[in-house]
Amino acid sequence: MKNTFAIYAFLASTASAHMQMSNPYPLRSPLNPDGGDNKDYSYTSPLDPSGANFPCKGYQNDAFKSVATYEGGQQYSMSLEGSATHGGGSCQLSLSYDTGKTFTVIESMEGGCPLTSNYTFTIPSDAPTGEALFAWSWFNKIGNREMYMNCAQVTVKGGSSKRAHARDLKVARDGTAFSSRPPLFIANVNGPGECTTTEGQEVKFPEPGPNLLGGVAGPGYTCKGSASFLGDGSSTGGSSGTSAAPSSTTTAPSDSSPSPAVTATTSPLNTALPTTTTSIPKAIPTDSPSSGQSCSTNGAIVCGSDGKAWSMCSSGSLISMGSVAAGTTCTNGAISKI
C-alpha cells in the first residue's frame, strides 16, 4: 500500500510539474530510486517567497549521501525534467562547501534557460576537495516572480594530473581562482538586497563569473539594497530603500533570447502555475482551453469556464497546462489566490 501511494503521489506531482533537476539527483528527489522514503513530491515548486526554505528547499542539512563524484578540471552534464519552462529565463550552477551558507557560481546561463534540458559544466580545476552541494537555480521569464533551486549532495575530488583528450577534459584557463568566483544571485525570496526579477525579462547577472553561456540585454531585476552578488556599483537603491534598475536599463527581447546550442530533450509533462497572482498578458477567454488552439499573445493565459483549468499561449498555439494549483483560480486571463 505504501508503494502504491508513493506511485500515485509521484504521478500527481509530475502531471503538474514545473522544472526540476534530474541529474544529479537533488535532495529528497522523487526521481531518485535510492532516495529513501522521505521524498518531496512537490519538488518542482519554486522556493517560498518569504525565504523560509532558501536554500535547497530547506534540505541542505540532510545527512550527507553523495549522488555524484566530480573531479576538478573535468566536464560533466546536468539534466532538467519538466515542460513548464515559463518562456525561459536565466540559470546558475554553483557549489557550496558549508551546507548552503554560501554558494560559489561555476556557470551562468543567461537567456533561454531551461528551454533545453541538458547542459554541460566544468568543475573548476582548483575547486576544493570534499563534500559539497551542487545547486541549480533558475529565474523564470514569464509568470510569477519566483526563484527555483534544487541542490544535490556531491563529492568533489582534486584535479587529475593525468593528461586527457580535449573533448573529455576541459581545464579552466581563465585564470580565475575559485575563491574569486562570484556568489549566487538571489532574488524573489526576501534575501540580501531585496531583489525582484522583472516580468518578461531574463536576468543579466551582475556577476556571472568567467563561465557564461548565452547573454541578454538585461537587467531583468531591481533591488532595494546592496548585496555581495550585485558587485561594485551595481547596488540598486542602497539605504534609500527605493527600487531602481542597475546601470544598464536596456529592455530584454520579449519573445526570445539566446539559447545554449544543446539538443533539447525535455519531458512531455504538463504543469500548474504557482499560487501568487500573475502579471502575464491576458488573452481572449475561452470556455475550453485546449492544446493546439491558435492564439496571438505569447505567454498569455486562457482560463477554463470553471476557473480550474488553464492553458498558455506559446508560439501561436495554446498549450494545456492542466489544473491550477490548490487555493487558486483562473479568471479573465490571470491566476490568483482564492
Image (spheres, rainbow, N blue to C red):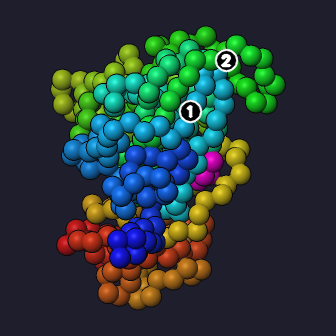
> Residue at image x 43%, y 33%?
133
Report x, y in % for residue 118: 63, 48
Q: Nearer the viewer, residue 103 or 272?
A: 103
Q: Is residue 32 visible in this depiction of the protein?
A: yes
Please identify the quadrant where the C terminus is shown: bottom left
Q: Is residue 36 above or below residue 223?
A: below
Please identify the quadrant where the N terminus is shown: bottom left
Give the mark, 2 or 1, whose residue is nearer the N terminus: 1
> Residue at image x 18%, y 26%?
240
Give the residues in magenta: 114-118
Report x, y in % for residue 297: 51, 68
User: Residue 262, labelled with which disc?
Assistant: none
Q: Is residue 333 above or below residue 204?
A: below
Label 2: how many residues lie within 10 Å, few (<14), some (14-19) or many (20+)? few
> Residue at image x 73%, y 26%?
169
Q: Magenta segment: does it hold 116?
A: yes
Q: Is residue 80 above or below residue 70?
A: below
Label 2 is placed on what type of residue?
Ser
Q: Magenta segment: does it hold 36?
A: no
Q: Is residue 212 visible in this depiction of the protein?
A: no
Label 1 is placed on what type of residue?
Thr
Report x, y in % for residue 57: 32, 46
Report x, y in % for residue 156: 52, 26
Q: Main secondary structure of the magenta part?
A: loop
Q: Nearer the viewer, residue 61 or 215?
A: 61
Q: Secondary structure at mark 2?
A: loop
Q: Disc 2 marks which residue?
A: 160
Q: Nearer the viewer, residue 105 or 115?
A: 105
User: Residue 69, labelled with which disc?
Assistant: 1
Q: CA distance from mark 2 to mark 1?
A: 13 Å
> Residue at image x 26%, y 50%?
48
Q: Secondary structure at mark 1?
A: strand
